[in-house]
Image (tube, rainbow, N blue to C red):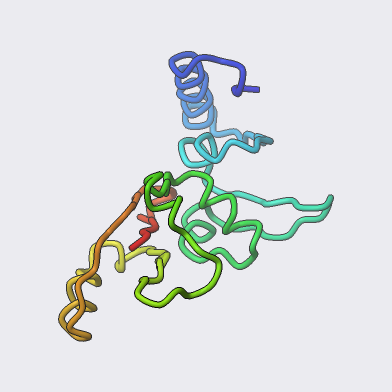
Amino acid sequence: ATSALDPATTQSILELLKEINRKLNITILLITHEMEVVKSICHEVAIIGGGELVEKGTVGDIFAHPKTELAHEFIRSTLDLSIPEDYQARLQPNRVEGSYPLVRMEFTGATVDAPLMSQISRKYNIDVSILSSDLDYAGGVKFGMMVA
């Protein structure tokens, strides 16, 4: 388990496992709930929920095209989408006259680099404030989320 280790020791162990895999050409079965570990060392991933295999594939495929809500939750857990406290205090469960909705957008692959926000702003003639966003990379795939 790497969860009890300091970051430098964790990274050293992961690098050692990668080297063993590469030099000895052996498969390593790693069981973890830490998505940072999955992103840094794994080629393939299997997601287990409720004692059942719910999704499996390459790390890139799972991060780019998660098929289950559990996979979405794991991916979201790797991104920091914290909303500033002053905005959180004003969040309402229902639409309030004069307020604006928050929208969460998920990006994978080529859409990460696309100028979607400027396109939306021009097309609908609206101003958009980005409150939080985070991008990451796993299995050769870029992915991220944004709250605006």
Q: Is residue 108 left or right of residue 33?
A: left
Q: Nearer the viewer, residue 30 or 112?
A: 112
Q: Residue at x 58, y 50 (%)?
A: 74
Q: Residue furthest right?
A: 51
Quarter placement of the N terminus: top right
Q: Nearer the viewer, residue 125 or 41?
A: 125
Q: Is residue 17 left or right of residue 127?
A: right
Q: Position of residue 32 (x, y in %)?
A: 65, 35
Q: Residue at x 48, y 29 (%)?
A: 18
Quarter placement of the C terminus: bottom left
Q: Compared with residue 103, is residue 138 higher up or lower down, i.e. above or below?
A: above
Q: Position of residue 21 (x, y in %)?
A: 53, 31
Q: Position of residue 84 (x, y in %)?
A: 37, 46
Q: Is residue 22 left or right of residue 117?
A: right
Q: Is residue 81 left or right of residue 92?
A: left
Q: Compared with residue 121, is residue 102 higher up or lower down, i.e. above or below?
A: above
Q: Residue at x 19, y 72 (%)?
A: 127
Q: Compared with residue 76, is residue 112 higher up or lower down, i.e. above or below?
A: below
Q: Quadrant of residue 129?
A: bottom left
